[in-house]
Amino acid sequence: MAIKEDIERGNDTVLESAAVSLLQEENDMADKEDGYTDQTSSKASLWMVYFSTFVAVCGSFEFGSCAGYSSPTQTAIRTDLSLSLAEYSVFGSILTFGAMIGAITSGPIPDFIGRKGAMRTATGFCVGGWLAIYFAKGALLLDVGRLATGYGMGVFSYVVPVFIAEIAPKNLRGALTTINQLMICTGVSVAFIIGTVLTWRALALTGLIPCAVLLFGLFFIPESPRWLAKIGREKEFEAALQDLRGKDTNISKEADEIRDYIETLERLPKAKMMDLFQRRYLNSVIIGVGLMVFQQFGGINGICFYVSNIFETAGFSAAVGTIIYAILQVVITGLNTTVIDKAGRKPLLLVSSTGLVLGCILSGDHNLALDAVPILAVTGILIYISAFSAGMGAVPWVIMSEIFPINIKGAAGSLATLVNWFGAWAVSYTFNFLMSWSAYGTFILYAAINAGAILFVVTLVPETKGKTLEQIQAAINA
C-alpha cells in the first residue's frame, strides 16, 4: 500500500510540476511569441490549416445530413414502404442508438488508427448506411442503414472537433472548431430544404456527396501532429506541424512545447475509463461531461420536435416556420465563429444560457400565450434556438476538444460524447410524456436546467481563449 501511495503521489507530482512549469512559462512566452503569432496568423502560411478544417467539417455536414434526413421524408417513406407509425418511429429513433454506439468507440478508434483513420471509418459506415436506405424495400434494411449512419454520426461528433483543435494555432482554434457546429446546422437545413423537392431515395444519395469530398480530401491533408507525437512518429510529427504552420514558419517552440507535455503525460500510467475519476483528471471530466449534460437536458431536442406544432397553432406555416428556424441556426452559428476567439468561450455560454431561460419562459405557458398573444409563443421558440446557436450549441464541443490531456482524450472524449447522445435520446423520448403531463411544467423544467447551466459555467468553466492546449490542460488539472 505504501509503495502504491508513493507511486500515486509521484504521478501527481510529475503532473503538478509540469503544470507549474507551463503556467510559469506562459507569461514569458507571451512576449517571445509575438513574432510566432504574427507568422501563424498569416493566411498564406495557414492555408493548410484552413483546407484541413474544410475537409474535416465535411464530416460535420454529413452529421447534419444524417440528422435532418427523417424530417422531410416521413410521409413519402411510410407511403412507399407501407410502414406503420411505430415502424417509422423506430427508423427515426434508431439513429440515436447508432450514435451512442459510435460515441463509445469514438475515443479508442482515433487513438488507435489516428484522427484521419477515424474519419475514414465513420465515412465508410455512412456510405454503407445511405446505400442501404436507398435500396431498402422494407423496414429491416431501412433500419440497418439508419443505424449505420448513426454510428458514423457518433464518431464524427467527437473526432472532427478534436482534429481541428489539434491542428489549429491557438489564436484561431475557437473559430475553426465552431465551424463544426455551423456545418452540422447547415447539413440539417440543406437536408430539410432539398428534401421538399427530392424523393426520399434521391435525398439518401445526396448524403454520399460530403462522404466523397471527405474521403478524397483526406489524401491531401496531414494527420494531427499531437497524435503523431503521442505515438512516437517524430519525423511525421515535425513534417505535419510544418505543413500546417507554413514552410517558412519556425515551429521549434511549438514543437518543443508539445513534446515536453506529451513526455510528461507518458510517465503516467495509461488511462482507463475508471482513471478519469482520479483527482488529477476530475476537473476536466466534470467540465467536459457537465457541459454536455446541460447542452442536451436543456431541452434542445424536445424543442425541435415541438417546433412545427408551435408554428401551426400560432397560425404560421409549419414549412415556412421551420425554414426560418433553420436559417436562424445557420446565421447565428456562423456569426459565432467570428467572435468566439475575441469574446471568449465563457461569455458566449453565459449569454446563451440566459437566452435559453428566457425562451423557455416565453414558450412555457403556451396555451395562455397562444390565446392572448400568439406571436409570443413563436418568439419564445425563435429566441430559444437563437440563444442555443449563439453558444450552447457549439461551445461545449470546442471546450471538450481543448480540456482533456492527450493521454485521457480517448476515454474522456468517449464518455462526454456518450453522455451527449444519451441526453439527446432521453430528452427526445420523454418530451411527449412531459408535454402530456404539463406543457407549462415541461418548459419551466427546461428553464430551471438552463439556469443551472449559468451557475455551472460561472463557478467551474475556465476561459480557454488565447491559450495553447497544453497550457489549458495544465491549468485545469494542476
Image (cartoon, rainbow, N blue to C red):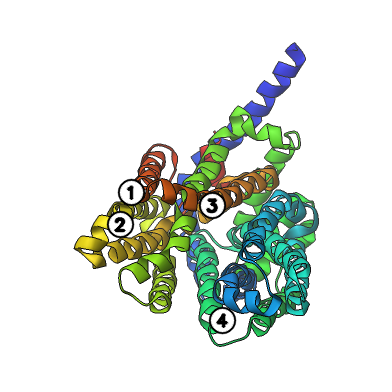
Closer to the chain start, of discs 3 and 2, is 2
Local SS, label 3: loop
Q: Earlier in the sequence, mark 1 or mark 3?
A: 1
Residue at image point 56% right, 48% down: 426
158 up-or-down from 131: above or below? above
Residue 216 relative to residue 251: left or right: right
Q: Left or right: where does residue 386 sit relative to residue 284? A: left
Q: Which residue is mark 1?
A: 440
In this figure, which residue is indicated by the disc labeled 2?
A: 366
Mark 4–mark 2 CB contact (< 8 Å): no
The Cα atoms of the two marked residues, 4 and 2, are separated by 30 Å
Q: Residue 88, image x and y in percent?
A: 64, 66
Q: Residues within 10 Å of mark 4 (few under 14, many from 20)?
A: many
Q: Nearer the viewer, mark 4 or mark 3?
A: 4
SS at mark 4?
A: loop
Report the residue marked by disc 4.
195
Residue 206 visible (yes or no)? yes
